[in-house]
Amino acid sequence: QLQLVESGGGLVQPGGSLRLSCAASGFDLDYYAIGWFRQAPGKEREGVSCISSSGGSTNYAASVKGRFTISRDNAKNMVYLQMNSLKPDDTAVYYCAADCSHVVLGSGYVIPSLDYWGKGTLVTVSS
C-alpha cells in the first residue's frame, strides 16, 4: 500500500522549534519532489516548502523562509521539515505530499491535484 505518514507535531511555545518527519511506504521517494503543506482552521491549504527528488533544490513560502528548513534522506525514504522561531500563525495541520514540482508555494494559490498525501500532523504554537 502506497502511503505517506507524517509525525513530529505537537504543542510548542512561540519562538520554539519542531521537526516534522514524513515517511514513505510502498514506493520510493527518490523519484518525487516532496512538499510540505499546511492548513490552518478556517483557511485554505497552502504550500510551505518543496524539495527536489535529489535534494539539490529547495523552495519556501515567503512566510516561512529563513525559519523553516526542508531536507531529505532518500536512503531512509524520509523527508523532514525543521521549523524554528515558530509563531502562532504557524498553527496548522501539516501534510507531506508528492509531487510538488509544479506547486506555487504560499497562501492564495490553488494547489493542483497531487498523487500522494499523508493524513497530517497537528502543530500548535501557543503560550
Image (cartoon, rainbow, N blue to C red):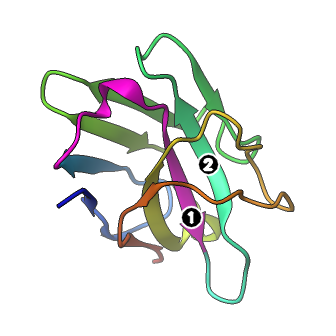
Magenta span covers which residues? 26-39
Q: Please, is residue 117 above or below residue 85 in the view?
A: below
Residue receiving disc 1? 38
The amino acid type, in three-letter code, at marker 1 is Arg
Label 1 with label 2: CB-CB less than 8 Å: yes
Residue receiving disc 2? 48
Of all residues shown, which one is farthest toward the bottom?
42
Q: Quadrant of the N terminus?
A: bottom left
Is residue 54 in view from this perspective?
yes
Q: Quadrant of the C terminus?
A: bottom left
Q: CA distance from mark 1 to mark 2?
A: 7 Å
Tell me what residue is drawn at x 64 percent, y 44 percent.
64
x and y percentages locating residue 118 in the rendered image:
36, 64
The amino acid type, in three-letter code, at marker 2 is Val
Q: Is residue 115 left or right of residue 66?
A: left
x and y percentages locating residue 31 in the rendered image:
38, 26
